[in-house]
Image (cartoon, rainbow, N blue to C red):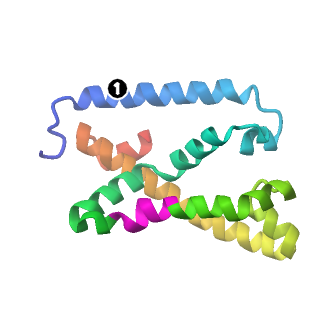
Amino acid sequence: MELGTYQYGGMVLIGVIIYMLVMLYIGWWSSKRVKDSTDYIVAGRRLPLFFTIGTLFATWFCAGTLMGATAQAYLFGNQGVIFDPWGAAVCLILAGLLFGRLMRRGGYLTLVDYFDIRFGKKMGIASSLVLVIAEVGWVGAQLVAFGTILQIFTGLPLAYGIIIS
């Protein structure tokens, strides 16, 4: 398939835009029910395990993972997906088993909270910087991946796909 020759590209773009508008509406509607940062970050600590697991996996497995894991599987077979997504899934499960109780008991919302309280303000700041740098890279990868998907299906330039995403 040549870039942008997918016959239903316009429908894909309309579907993506509708999906994004629905997500924005759900976000706006949900924001009215959020009372504080605990309510926002960890759903007031009231989320059932099933939804917690689903939320975590939905956060972790995204456009970058979808495209990257697919490419790795294509190039290297099953061995290509050992690290991502399977390695990431094992990491998330182990992190939950090893640190979940500690985080809940301590009332920590983030890893930065833990490092800040356990090791002091400087370590909290250092861990914040590391996480911000990692997240900027992560978000950038998602934007490029989703922009690429839009480019392939609609023929839009990559920059437009990134802006839409």
Q: How many marks?
A: 1
Residue drawn at x 61%, y 38% as measured from the top left? 51
Q: In the shown orientation, is residue 9 left or right of residue 132?
A: left
Residue at the image position 47 percent from the left and 51 percent from the top: 61
Amino acid type of the residue tagged 1 in the rendering: Ile
Residue 96 in picture, x, y percent from top left: 66, 58
User: Is 137 on the left-hand or right-hand side of 119?
Assistant: left
Q: Quadrant of residue 112?
A: bottom right
Residue 137 visible at all = no
Vertical order, 89 against 43 (above or below): below
Q: Residue furthest left?
A: 1
Q: Position of residue 94 (x, y in %)?
A: 61, 64
For residue 28: magenta?
no
Nearest to the observer: residue 133 or residue 93: 93
The relative height of residue 157 versus residue 136 in the rendered view (above or below) is above
Quadrant the C terminus occupies: top left
Provide residue 27's location: percent of width, then percent of height: 62, 30
Measured as percent of width and height from the top left, residue 148 is found at: 32, 49
Closest to the observer, 139 or 103: 103
Q: Is residue 10 left or right of residue 104?
A: left
Q: Is residue 12 visible?
A: yes
Q: Quadrant of the N terminus?
A: top left
- Res. 114 image quadrant: bottom right
Residue in the foreground of this view, choosing between 66 and 49: 49
The residue positioned 29% from the left and 30% from the top of the image is 12
**As displayed, is residue 142 above or below residue 118?**
above
Q: Give the residue at mark 1.
A: 14
In terms of secondary structure, where does tag 1 sit? helix
Q: Which residues are magenta?
A: 81-89
Residue at 41 percent of width and 55 percent of height: 64
- The front one of 163 and 16 is 16
